[in-house]
């Protein structure tokens, strides 16, 4: 069996940790990752890589030409989470970027032994699930010398102990749609409600009614989420405003269930507006498909993880209704997505986006070998 445990891998892990520490100090919002991008490019200039210019201000793509007939792609996201104060790395994308930079070091050193050429994708704007589509729209898979035959991605998982790797077959993360509902009424004086049409009342009815989409319109054995993220209307000085705006999303693993949720949300919005004598506009955006690990990719990924960390550290996990725009890339190229344990064993660790989120310092000792093995597995 292929062994990755050597001095070059030790160097790659050590460098990945150093990159991670530096990237953690320069968190940047989606599509604003200018310092992060410059850091990535400054590191990659020192390796025998071809820069693929997509004409994007942030993000970077490099191709390692190993003289092979096929190419494998490896992807990491680079953006931080927007917060009320400043961007912060509360989802571990800095660790993902550090991992891929560590993989650059190892795979370039092993260039003559690689069975594939390697495409390194440092993707901006995973938060908000916009970056993968932006890269595709800028010609990602047209501008590379070879379109990859497979693509692999990783994400840390605080609920899994550091050292373990989740290799899951089937749906792993959810399909997501984002909606914005605008209800328009007739503003006026609060003492003359009969001469007004109050969109706040209609909004309240919609929020209440929306709960029945999950409880009454969806198979209870299908995991789904249908939520309201924000309701904006009026002010203390305007008792009856002209409009109320509601935003939210719905998520599922099963596409037919997803379509059913969309139908019900639309009918509920229209009927609620009519019942409360409002006009309405509903915008629904399909954000991302589900992350689905195919059976044929599962076998390859399992062997890669076994090579990297040993069978005893391969675990399975329930899927998660979070979404990931790695799924957009995997619609273009067969893909597999790992969760790599980032939790400290014996400790309850904060989840993604929690203010107390952190990644165990030993994370790279697993993530770098796993992603490297994925590029070396025939």
Image: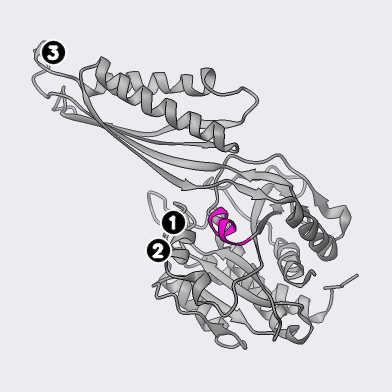
Q: Split into 4 quadrants, where in the image is the N terminus?
A: bottom right
Pointers 3 and 2 in contact (CB under 8 A)? no
As helix, strand or loop, the secondary structure at mark 1 comes to loop
Do tag 1 and tag 2 residues touch (Cβ < 8 Å)?
yes
The residue singled out by tag 1 in the image is 130
* Occupied quadrant, residue 274: top left
Tell whether 112 sits left or right of 30.
right
Over which residues does the magenta segment extend? 326-333
Q: Mark 3 = which residue?
A: 193
Tell me which residue sits at (43%, 29%) in the image: 263
Q: Earlier in the sequence, mark 3 or mark 2?
A: 2
Give x and y (percent) for residue 130: 44, 56
- The part of the image, by quadrant, that contains residue 181 is top left
Q: Position of residue 299 (x, y in %)?
A: 80, 56
- For the residue labelled by badge 3, is the local secondary structure a helix, a strand or a loop? helix
Upstream in sequence: badge 1 or badge 2: 2
CA distance separating discs 1 and 2: 9 Å
x and y, in percent, of residue 370 in the image: 75, 64
Spatial separation of the CA atoms under disc 3 and disc 2: 45 Å
Q: Is residue 144 above or below residue 159?
A: below
- Considering only vertical position in the picture, is 240 above or below 330? above
């Amino acid at each position: 069996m292929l062994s990755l445990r050597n001095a070059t891998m030790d160097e790659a892990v050590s460098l990945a940790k150093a990159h991670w520490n530096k990237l953690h100090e320069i968190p940047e919002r989606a599509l604003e990752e200018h310092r992060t991008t410059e850091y990535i490019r400054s590191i990659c200039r020192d390796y025998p890589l071809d820069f693929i210019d997509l004409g994007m201000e942030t993000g970077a793509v490099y191709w390692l030409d190993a003289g092979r007939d096929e190419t494998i792609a490896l992807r990491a996201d680079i953006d931080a989470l927007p917060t009320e104060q400043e961007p912060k790395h509360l989802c571990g994308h800095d660790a993902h970027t550090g991992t891929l930079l560590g993989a650059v070091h190892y795979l370039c050193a092993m260039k003559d032994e690689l069975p594939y050429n390697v495409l390194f994708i440092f993707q901006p704007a995973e938060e908000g699930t916009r970056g993968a589509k932006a890269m595709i729209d800028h010609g990602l898979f047209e501008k590379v010398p070879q379109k990859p035959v497979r693509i692999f991605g990783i994400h840390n998982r605080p609920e899994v102990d550091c050292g373990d790797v989740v290799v899951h077959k089937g749906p792993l993360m959810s399909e997501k749609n984002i909606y914005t509902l605008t209800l328009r009424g007739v503003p006026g004086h609060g003492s003359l409600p009969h001469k007004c049409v109050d969109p706040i009342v209609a909004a309240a009815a919609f929020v209440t009614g929306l709960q029945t989409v999950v409880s009454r319109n969806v198979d209870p054995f299908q995991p789904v989420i249908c939520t309201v993220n924000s309701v904006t209307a009026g002010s203390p000085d305007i008792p009856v405003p002209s409009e109320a705006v509601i935003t939210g999303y719905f998520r599922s693993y099963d596409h037919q269930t997803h379509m059913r949720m969309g139908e019900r949300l639309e009918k509920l919005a229209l009927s609620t507006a009519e019942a409360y004598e409002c006009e309405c506009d509903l915008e629904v955006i399909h954000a991302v498909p589900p992350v689905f690990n195919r059976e044929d990719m599962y076998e390859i990924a399992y062997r890669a993880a076994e090579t990297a960390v040993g069978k005893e550290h391969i675990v399975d996990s329930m899927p998660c209704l979070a979404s990931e725009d790695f799924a957009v890339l995997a619609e273009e190229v067969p893909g597999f997505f790992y969760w790599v344990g980032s939790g400290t064993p014996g400790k309850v660790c904060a989840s993604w986006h929690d203010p107390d989120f952190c990644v165990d310092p030993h994370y790279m000792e697993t993530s770098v070998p796993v992603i490297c093995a994925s590029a070396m597995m025939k």
